Amino acid sequence: MKIIQISAIWCSSCLVMQKIWNHVKDAFPEIEWCKMDLDFDSEEVSKYQVGDKIPVLIFEKNGEECSRLIGEKKEEEVMLWIKQNLEN
Amino acid sequence: MTYLDYSATTPVNDEVIESYVRACKNFIGNPNSLHRLGIEANSLMKEATEQIASLLGVKSSEIIYTSGSSESNNTAIKGIAFQYQNRGKHIITTELEHSSVIAPLQYLVSLGFEVDFVPLDSDGKVNLEALKKLLRNDTILVSIGSVSSELGILQPIEEIAQLLKSYPKCFFHVDMTQSIGKVKLSLENIDLISFSAHKFYGMKGIGVLVKKEPIMLEPLIHGGKSTTIFRSGTPALALIVSLAKALRLAFQNMESNQIHELNRYLRNELEKIEPIHINSPETAIPHILNFSVPGIKPETLQHSLEEKDIFISTQTACSKGGPSSAVMALTHNESYATSSVRVSISYLTTKEEISYFVKMLIEAIERLQLHG
């Protein structure tokens, strides 16, 4: 299981989410967390077709995308999203 | 041409260009050189610096020249963080800040610093009580822009500065890029102030960081003492002279009612156009009016108006596509955040230009709604 985090250094919403992501990462150590920067990793990011909607989290199981979570979210929402993806 | 993007940059004033050319031609020496030409150049630089300091009400020794606000913001934020990290690693800012504030903060977070965002009131102003609650013993910096570039929200800087007086270990940095020459603000009780000349009819490539004494900063550029130990490099004398000129002219022209009247006229006209939602609160500075046209991509609207020789902005010139974090933070509405555009006016703007813009905007919206 893997979460791909796509963010950018200039994006304030990404900075807002950073603290929440850190908590979430600690709560789910079994999930691999892969961070990509919209500009610095543009080639890899282009595979995910996020357009310009960041921050985005993409949940992957066995290399297949299950769902994505876009924009600023509360910690409970991110936790719930992960739990739902784990259960499905 | 109808230029309505003065908050992105302004045309350079003729007198400013003349002062730049004169300094280039007549003062060829390096202000750091010890021969006569250097001494003459240094003397002119000191004179210009004294003028700038006097206009701002600070000491000459507190002026640091930079390439512009992005460098000033980076120097202030990283400089304080690295210099005072033994005191703490906690920094407070807002979601309305420019990318040149957000990006160094992201960088600092990657090095172990912690950043909190202060909640905003419904008009986008910093909630002072919320700020007070966020302040901790290890807070070393509060960085808040006086006017948000996208929305024109004017923050209660003097009240924040007053509050922070009770926290002597915490420095207060204000990005004044969008307020210098537009709004009168006291620099008292503010530790660091950033601004750029090209926002007030000066030239691109020169900015200032005011750093009050005796604050120390870890410099970004190491290279020994130039005009200051905090930013090395040969002083850009002609740009410095032109900045002094631009600042003086901006301060002289600040008291114009014309911009208030034009903003009121534009606001009234936009309110009549059905799909439009005005994002800039009534308390925003009159120079900036941000609005959304839900259902129409800002870039499409921008290009459609460009065909009529009208130039407006989608977000700020320094950010990049996507939903606007600032509009989202203020309106909590994704539809508004993905369809916002900014009109920014100046004392050069005329009522005829605004009328033409409104007429073309209505036409563009009708056309784009019809054809998608």
Image: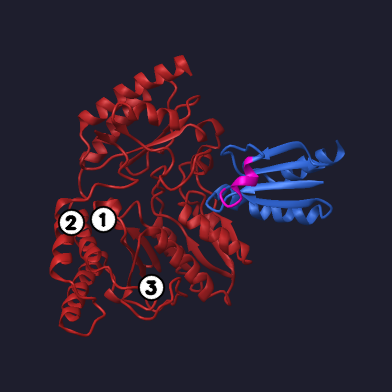
Chain colours: A blue, B red
- Packing grade of label 3 (10 A; few <14, some 14-19, many >=20) is many
Label 3 sits on residue: B231
**Amino acid marked by disc 3:** Arg
Secondary structure type for disc 2: helix
Q: Where is residue B186 shown, x and y percent of the image?
A: 31, 61
Instruction: Residue B245: name its quadrant.
Output: bottom left
Tell whether B167 sits left or right of B231: right
Q: Which of the two residues, B121 or B307, is positioned nearer the viewer here? A: B307
Q: CA distance from mark 2 to mark 1?
A: 8 Å
Nearer-N-terminus badge (2/1): 2
Q: Where is residue B35 shown, x and y percent of the image?
A: 18, 84
Please tell me which residue is depicted at 24% across the width and 35% down the height of the picture: B261
Label 1 sits on residue: B203
Image marks 2 and 1: residues in contact by CB distance under 8 Å: yes
Q: Residue furthest right?
A: A87
Q: Bounds of the magenta span?
A: A39-46
Instruction: Residue A57: name its quadrant.
Output: top right
Q: Residue furthest top?
A: B370
Vertical relation: B208 (above or below) B32: above
**Amino acid marked by disc 1:** Met
Q: Can residue B253 be seen at all in this image of the molecule?
A: yes
The total of numbered circles placed on residues is 3
Which of the labelled discs sits on residue B16, or is there none? 2
| Main secondary-structure element of the magenta-colored stretch | helix
Nearer-N-terminus badge (2/3): 2
